[in-house]
Image (cartoon, rainbow, N blue to C red):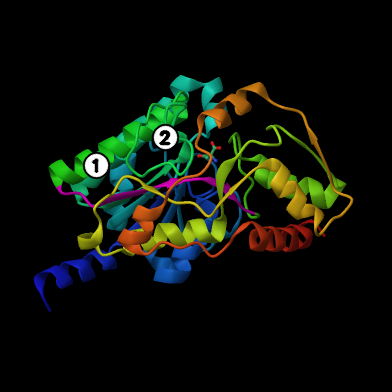
Amino acid sequence: MRIAELRATLAMMKKMLVTGALGQIGSELVPALRERYGSEAIVASGIRFRPVNSVTEGGTFEILDCTSVDDISAIVQRHDVGTIYHMAAIMSAIGEKKPEEAWDLNFGAFANILKVARQHRCAVFFPSSIGAFGPTTPSQNTPQDTLQRPTTIYGVAKVAGEMLSDYYAARFGLDTRGLRLPGLISNVTPPGGGTTDYAVDIFYQAVREKRYACFLRAETRLDMMYMPDAISSITQLMEADASRLKHRNAFNVTAMSITPAELAAEIQRYIPDFVMDYDVDPLRQEIADSWPDSMDDSAARAEWDWSPRYDLASMTKDMLKKVRTKLK
Ligand code: AKB
């Protein structure tokens, strides 16, 4: 076995820590990682409270406040962690209501993660976002490498996180990788305080009430992705051959570029009497208007073979099926 292969195997044997494991992505990432690598290989963590659910009961779960370097370091040492998936974050709309807190968590806690990762030579996954772009970014087919001057604290922290990740990779040889995720559509854990959350809420309201008041205007176009694709994109990137990666932080990834009106029309194919109203929230509309309409994800496709499975039609069909079962 060559030294590089031996190192890779040893790295694989170390554990994987997921922060923010009870959040929208974490609560689906943890079961997927347990399934893929074995539940003994995964350490899920969340701040402060421990509800009884599949994440807390299906394997190791630790209470972890990522604003403390010492606490992160203790868990990394105790469990012999080799990879950190840092999912703890405050979403864009909530971030505008408490910007200092959002900065401390979305950037400060991530800087702590990198510090600990450097000490213990951990690989790191960073979830950046379409929020890392701003009103001066080209909004159609947004290039991988382009102008990034976001106008939200969420976006400022994402750009800073992307840059600090690349700095640790270049300066300290750390294996940091990241994705610019679009709005995520899921049926396990509801999102909270995001600008793209309408694309989840609409399904619950369509099934329950056959009516939904959307907080974005009908024609607001944004990139979206179904959660199973988001989970695959994360594991695929982290397993990608490092020698093929020209970029690291962070890859544009998308699965569909849709408007509220288009999503409503797709839902009406299954629920013909579904009615969409619009009750626009000026804050979230302003944020959405500053984000791209559609990202170019060709770098991800070329460097690690990214390709989504779900489009608008297949995502809508599956979401309605799962939400109907859940609400029965
Ligand atoms: C949000 O709307 O804040 C998030 C995101 C696109 O990063 N879902």
Cα separation, mark 2 vs mark 1, equals 15 Å
The label number, if any, that marks residue 132 in the structure image: 2
The amino acid marked with disc number 1 is Asp
Residue 108 within the segment the image draws in magenta: no
In the rendered image, the vertical position of residue 145 relative to residue 124, given as above or below: above
| Residue 119 picture location, percent across and down | 19, 45
Q: From the viewer's side, name the closer residue of 215 and 36.
A: 215
Question: Which of the two discs, 2 and 1, labels the residue nearer the N terminus?
Answer: 2
Task: Estimate how packed mark 2 is, as few (under 14), some (14 to 19) or many (20 or more) residues with alpha carbons within 10 Å.
Answer: many
| Residue 62 picture location, percent across and down | 44, 50
User: Which residue is drawn at the image coordinates 38% and 60% (left, top)?
Assistant: 301
| Residue 290 picture location, percent across and down | 51, 28
The amino acid marked with disc number 2 is Ala
Range drawn in magenta = 173-186
Q: Which residue, given by chain and number where applicable, does mark 1 sit on?
A: 166
Q: From the viewer's side, name the closer residue of 151 and 293.
A: 293
